[in-house]
Structures are given as C-alpha cells and as structure tokens.
Amino acid sequence: MFAQGKFKEARKVIEKVVQGSRASSTHWEHYGDILFQLGEVDNAVVQWQKARETGADQTRLDKKINTRRLN
C-alpha cells in the first residue's frame, strides 16, 4: 500500500502490527515513513526513534531523525 501511495490504508495495517508484542524495528521505521508521508513529521520522528532503540540501522535512522525527512 505504501508503494502505491495509499498511506491512510497502510497506516491502518501498520498500527495493528505495532500494537502487538512482535513489532520489529522495521515495523517502527515503516510506521514513521507512513506518518511522514501523511504530514505527521513529529510523530514520524518518534517512531523512527523507537526503531533506532530496537536495533535498526542507526546510520539511516539517525539521518532521518536529524533531517526530519525520508532519505
């Protein structure tokens, strides 16, 4: 859905995933990417920070967090 630009629909799906106990750093990062595309930059940064804390690629996430943009 994300690749098709269906960000609202993608948000519904990813929110169900991250509510579960098995959310991975990739899920948190994708959630941030979706929120960014929906114009919720502050919220996106929070999700990217969660992804970073759970062991994702810190270099890529640091860049997203510091620039507040998708890279």
Image (spheres, helix red, strand yellow):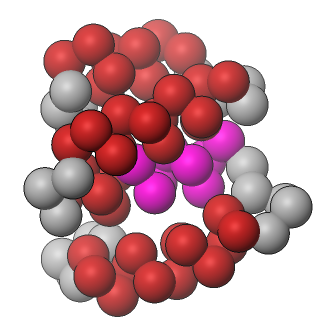
Instruction: Give the residue displayed 41% in from the left and 14% down from the top.
Output: 62
**Residue 13 on image: x %, y %:** 52, 82
The residue at 55%/72% (across/down) is 15
Residue sitting at the far left: 39
Residue 16 higher or lower than 28, as above or below: below
Residue 27 relative to residue 19: left or right: left
Residue 4 belongs to magenta span: no
Q: Is residue 67 above or below residue 27?
A: above
Q: Residue at x 44, y 23 (%)?
A: 61
Instruction: Indicate whether 4 appears above or below 35.
Output: below
Magenta span includes 29: yes
**Residue lying farthest right?**
21
Horizontal and vertical percent position of residue 48: 46, 35
Corner quadrant of residue 51 = top right
Total numbered labels placed on residues in the image? 0
> Is 61 on the left-hand or right-hand side of 67?
right
The N terminus lies in which quarter of the figure? Answer: bottom left
Quadrant of the image containing the C terminus: top left
Q: Position of residue 3 (x, y in %)?
A: 27, 72
Q: Main secondary structure of the magenta part?
A: helix
| Residue bounds of the magenta highlight | 25-32
Point 31% across, 72% down: residue: 2
Where residue 8 appears, as percent x and y from the top left, is: 28, 82
